[in-house]
Structure formats: C-alpha cells, structure tokens
Image (spheres, grey):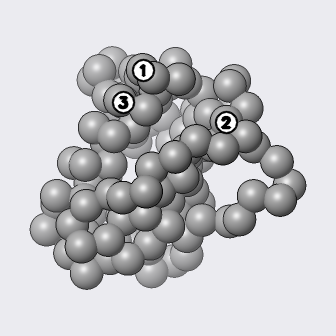
Amino acid sequence: MDQCLTALRGILDDLAANPAAAGLDRSLSCRLTDLDQVVMGRLASGAVRDVHVVPHGPDLAKADIRLTMTSDDLVALTAGELSFGPAWATGRVKLEAGLRDLLRLRKLL
C-alpha cells in the first residue's frame, strides 16, 4: 500500500500543478481493486490534500472524480510502463466524473 500511495501522490501532485487544474476544488478517489482499498483526497488550490486510505464498501461517499484500477496498473502508470490513454481505452483504468470535469481532465491526462 505504501508503494501505491507514493505512486498516486506522484500522479496527483503532477495533476494539481498543471495550470489547467487551477480553480478546481474536487474530491478524488482511487479504488485499488486487488487491495479492496480506496485512497481518498481533495484537489484544491493547486494541491492535493487530506489523502487517506479507507476500506472499500457501500457506505463510502462518492468522490467527484473517481479512478479504479489494480495496484500493479497504478505503479505501472507512474513508472511510465503504462500509458493512461490505452489503459483507459482497454478498461484497465476506469475514470468517472461529471462531464465538465471529464472535459477538464482530458487536458490534464
């Protein structure tokens, strides 16, 4: 899980630093299907804050921007061994968000 948190922090910090993310204030989640854990956080003011891990379950609040993948795919994304576009197109990585957020994220990813 530590390796996943480090990898996810790298992705989210890059995303938050992008000028296209300016003004965004959204809750984020990344569900790691093989670990049955969800990493939650908030993207606001050019940074990702309040990153914490919770067990996946039906009581979990739905984040504005939701990623779903395996821990291996997360690590491969950050190591440059897997590209987001092809991983998303083949279903290895799922991204769910409102239409406005998806259009904005398209510029970021």
Mark 3 = which residue?
Answer: 7
Res 3 label: 1
Q: Secondary structure at mark 1?
A: helix
Mark 2 = which residue?
Answer: 37
20 left or right, relative to 63: left
Quarter of the rendering containing residue 77: top left
Residue 57 x %, y %: 82, 48
Quarter of the rendering containing residue 56: top right
Res 11 label: none
One can see residue 91 in this view: no
- 55 or 72: nearer the viewer: 55
Residue 108 x %, y %: 27, 58
19 left or right, relative to 64: left
- The residue at 38%/77% (across/down) is 25
Residue 104 x %, y %: 34, 72
- The residue at 32%/71% (across/down) is 44
Q: Which kind of residue does numbered mark 2 sit on?
A: Gln
